């Protein structure tokens, strides 16, 4: 990934936090009107990521923030949630998102996590999971998932994540959060405890 380098964000990196927040604010516009409405909200989001257990890392292109990823353990470390993942506008489609996720995946495996997951909202009616009743026939509705417009879901599917659930109306009526997960140790759910 030359000349890129990964740096752990810390609360002391005021300039880097500010820059990361601006990148997140700009990149989030394409997916959400709610999530990061202002740069101030994005600065708060960066600080929140630093307060969580786990990692918050940026990928620097020289001194410029090209991507930001956060990941935190849950369920006593058996599960790791990625939140957020942001690739700066201008750097999309160059493999940076995949590279960041791969780094976190390696870290999560090393920690002994079994499951890596993300939640991605559909606020823009870009998938077949928006605008439908997700309380009925939930399994078949998920099984017939398809995109009707560009959405980050496509990225996560490409990286081997599966849709494992939905949280109805998470972002407003008919606007669900889509839960996607990837098994880390063996094919998910197939091991049996004695
Ligand atoms: C989604 C995002 C993280 C992808 O990062 P990226 O660096 O552009 O993606 P990559 O170049 O690493 O792409 C990896 C693969 O996913 C594919 N891909 C990327 N975005 C995709 C999308 N929206 N839909 C379908 N496929 C996608 C790429 O074509 C590539 O496929 P390949 O295996 O054929 O090479 C980036 O577009 C982004 O930050 N968007 C705004 C914020 C966001 O949506 N974050 C995720 C919130 S859940």
Image (spheres, helix red, strand yellow):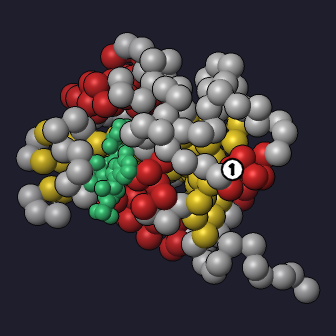
Residue 23 image position (x, y, % from top left): 26, 30
Q: Is residue 36 left or right of residue 141?
A: left
- Of residues 78 and 52, the one nearer the viewer is 78
At x 55%, y 34%, the residue is 121
Q: Which quarter of the picture shows residue 14?
A: top left
Q: Where is mark 1, residue-wise?
A: 142
At x 68%, y 50%, the residue is 142
Q: Is residue 174 left or right of residue 127?
A: right
Q: Which quarter of the picture shows residue 22?
A: top left
At x 43%, y 63%, the residue is 159
Residue 171 image position (x, y, % from top left): 61, 23
- Residue 49 visible within the image: no
Q: Is residue 2 left or right of residue 165?
A: left
Q: State the quadrant of the C terminus.
A: bottom right
- Of residues 176 and 25, the one nearer the viewer is 176
The relative height of residue 41 versus residue 185 in the rendered view (above or below) is above
Q: State the quadrant of the N terminus.
A: bottom left
């Amino acid at each position: 990934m030359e000349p890129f380098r990964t740096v752990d964000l810390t609360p002391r990196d005021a300039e880097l936090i500010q820059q990361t927040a601006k990148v997140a604010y700009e990149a989030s516009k394409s997916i959400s009107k709610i999530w990061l409405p202002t740069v101030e909200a994005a600065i708060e989001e960066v600080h929140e990521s630093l307060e969580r257990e786990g990692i918050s890392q940026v990928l620097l292109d020289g001194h410029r923030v090209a991507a930001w990823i956060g990941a935190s353990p849950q369920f006593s470390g058996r599960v790791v949630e990625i939140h957020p993942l942001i690739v700066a506008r201008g750097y999309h489609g160059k493999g940076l998102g995949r590279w960041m996720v791969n780094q976190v995946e390696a870290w999560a495996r090393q920690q002994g996590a079994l499951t890596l997951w993300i939640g991605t909202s559909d606020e823009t009616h870009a998938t077949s999971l928006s605008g439908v009743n997700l309380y009925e026939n939930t399994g078949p509705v998920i099984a017939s998932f398809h995109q009707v417009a560009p959405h980050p879901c496509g990225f996560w599917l490409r990286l081997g994540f599966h849709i494992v659930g939905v949280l109805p109306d998470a972002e407003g009526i008919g606007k669900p959060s889509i839960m996607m997960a990837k098994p880390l140790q063996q094919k998910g759910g197939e091991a049996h405890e004695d």
